Amino acid sequence: MFMFHKFAFSIGGSVNLSVEYQTIQATPNEDGFYQTEQGDKLEVSASDLEKFTYCPLSWALSKSGVAGQGHSILQGVERNEEISKAALELTENQIRERRNLEIWTWWVSVVVILCIDGFVFLNVDNIQSASNEVPRYLALWALSSLILAIFTITLPWRSWVNLETTKPSEPMLIEPIFEPPDFIGGWFEGGRIESALLFGSIILALHSIALQWADDKEKAAFILVVTALVWTLFSTYRLKKALIAHEQMIKLSTVIGIDLSTQVVYSDSEESSEALLIDSNTGLRGRPNQIVIIDQEFIPVEQKSGRPPKVPHESHKVQILAYLKLVESSTQHQPSYGVINYGNEKVFKILWNQENRELLESKIKAVQEAMVTGGAHRNHERVGKCNNCSRAHACPERLT
């Protein structure tokens, strides 16, 4: 059941301002978290916690529909959009670089094998006796390998034969858009059978062509060496694409403010419902700016604009603690810390320890209690804080 709670104030004897937002009927459970009669926990977002910690009245104003105003708000929105876009592009380029380097490695292997075989052909005798039937067998073998490779890539044959597959050691959080880490097939990790079949069909076909066209060992060796040079051009093209992707990664990692080798597995630009992280035990929910993998751990990253402080703001600290809790709930793995990045100029690590767990739980319960009782007032006596508040224009308790 919802009710409206209203605070009415008079400022300067002429202007009446009020704060009005819905309150909810709920009671605390044995853990102290509020839940409805149906047993559903009251939903508290990480953004709610950030606003409430900054000033409960500012949070109440946002609940009543008062939008933030000011240059800092616009700057923050633009910064988040820039970072979210850069994070997705960085993920694309990381996959693009890895894919091209993987293919380049295979193609360089083809070049090496062709060069070795060209040398061997140049130094063997009686090549003409082998050039009649062997090319045909090699061609059929190559065709069979190619057909089998196509079937193994496109069909879920592993599930048909109950073949166990090796899952990645890193816990899955959200299914990536471009290439799931547990993908089985193709050129990448876990698809070695498919790769071997494709690789073998290429090698067999090239040798069949060389033997078919060769009248003597010198000609066969020449054909293989020329083919190796042509294949070198193909592999160089793949290497160039990998280098271009790497150069883009350098630029994008600077925008995001993370190390180039860091893998971004989550970005809040994803609008699907799966992008929302939820902890059913507390009612907490939210979308971190990014989640990255560092030392086999999922680490949430919160990006902040504006002048970097000497120590992280309490409201920002509580917000990253919320994301740490959500990451832990979603992955069933405990992260060691979260990161607050103030415009690439200063980075703070916030530890996920027992003290901070208790701080987060107390803040969640305080917000839920305010959602039930409707009690929300200014929690400070700082004029500067009111001046910097994006909702000061509608605040009935402001100090200026």
Image (cartoon, grey):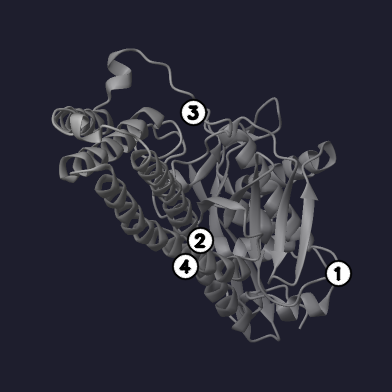
Q: Is residue 35 visible?
A: no
Residue at figure coordinates x 85%, y 71% from the top left: 381
Q: Which residue is identified by label 4?
A: 244
Above-or-below relation of 22 to 245: above
Instruction: Name the amino acid, label 3.
Output: Gln
Secondary structure under tag 3 reads loop
Please tell me which residue lies in front, 333 or 15. 333
Residue projecting furthest to the front: 125
Q: Is the C-beta separation of discs 3 and 2 under 8 Å?
A: no
Instruction: Name the amino acid, label 4.
Output: Ile
Residue at figure coordinates x 16%, y 45% from the top left: 213
Q: Which residue is identified by label 3?
A: 38
Image quarter in which the C terminus is found: bottom right
Q: Which residue is identified by label 2?
A: 90
Residue 249: percent from left, percent from top: 54, 64
Residue 12: percent from left, percent from top: 71, 86
Secondary structure under tag 1 reads loop
Give the quadrant of residue 255: bottom right
4 or 1: tag closer to the N-terminus:
4
4 or 3: tag closer to the N-terminus:
3
Tell me if mark 1 has few (under 14), some (14-19) or many (20+) residues whose alpha carbon lies within 10 angstroms of its own. Answer: few
Residue at figure coordinates x 54%, y 40% from the top left: 278
The residues tagged by marks 1 and 3 sit, at their Cα atoms, a distance apart of 45 Å
Q: Is residue 283 left or right of residue 188?
A: right
Q: Which residue is identified by label 1?
A: 310
Instruction: Name the amino acid, label 1.
Output: Lys
